[in-house]
Image (tube, rainbow, N blue to C red):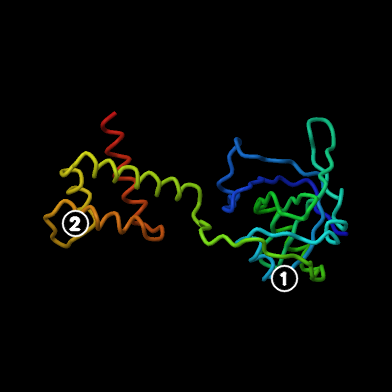
Amino acid sequence: MIYTYDILLNWTKDDRLKEFFEWNLEDDLEHIKKMPIIRIRESMLKDLLTSKIKMSKEFLSKIKYKTESYFHNDIDVIDYAVIVTTLKKSLALELDNEGNVIYKSNLLLDEEEEVLEIGEELMIMDIDYKVVSKNNKISYLTRKEEEEKKFLTKEIKKIKTNKEESKLNYLYKEFFSTELNNFNDKLKLIEKEISKDYSSFHHRLYNLLKLSTTKKK
């Protein structure tokens, strides 16, 4: 089996994986000493990114006790863990003894590039697995973008609750040229834009609202 050595992982149970540029020191980071690499098909990687997956006991036996991590001054053996890769993306997985994927992690940029290079030399392994459940609500936003959308939703709700007409008018004029006089009509239009996929609109509106809340302080 082929291994990669001395890498850092950011384990998450969430369906939304953190990209390397979003990692914080408060995250569940683990320094891995060595971990096996297996090349898989694109279709399986897609399932891993969008669904809860359970792999066969036969596959578990192939990766059992093959991953080691640094734990203080000792070496800790992880029962079932592996890095799966295509020629485009790599993903670290930790599984329980039933084959369920319980943790996932992206890789740091330079470490992923190294794994992708190794993957070019590997044959695709067909792994027996099943999709336990699909997640249709997976967010592909960065952590920062998600924070901005949550902030906007909260602030617009405040404007609505407190009937802050002057503030709403100011925001509306910054983004829309259509003439609307009704408070609720303006509010609904802004709410509709916020509910759409993240865009420059969200970031600009976030900056405006942040500026206004900072000035109040």
Q: Nearer the viewer, residue 96 or 12?
A: 96
Could you tell me which residue is drawn at 50 percent across and 52 percent down? Answer: 142
Of the residues tagged 1 and 2, which is closer to the observer?
Answer: 2
Could you tell me which residue is drawn at 37 percent across and 60 percent down? Answer: 196
**Residue 115's image quarter?**
bottom right
Q: Determine whether, in the image, residue 133 is placed left or right of residue 126.
A: left
Q: Residue furthest left?
A: 181
Q: Three-letter amino acid code at disc 2?
A: Asp
Q: Position of residue 212 (x, y in %)?
A: 27, 38
Could you tell me which residue is drawn at 87 percent across and 58 percent down? Answer: 62
Report the disc number at residue 90: none
Q: Nearer the viewer, residue 216 or 130?
A: 130
Q: Position of residue 38 (x, y in %)?
A: 79, 62
Q: Earlier in the sequence, mark 1 or mark 2?
A: 1
Other residues around mark 1 within 10 Å, as few (<14) / some (14–19) / many (≥20): some
Q: Determine whether, in the image, residue 132 is placed left or right of residue 197.
A: right
Is 86 located above or below residue 30 in the figure?
below
Residue with the mark numbered 1:
41
**Residue 126's image quarter?**
bottom right
Q: Position of residue 157 (x, y in %)?
A: 29, 44
Residue with the mark numbered 2:
185
Q: Three-letter amino acid code at disc 1?
A: Arg
Q: Determine whether, in the image, residue 150 is placed left or right of residue 164.
A: right
Other residues around mark 2 within 10 Å, as few (<14) / some (14–19) / many (≥20): few
Q: Position of residue 127 (x, y in %)?
A: 79, 67
Determine the secondary structure under disc 1: loop
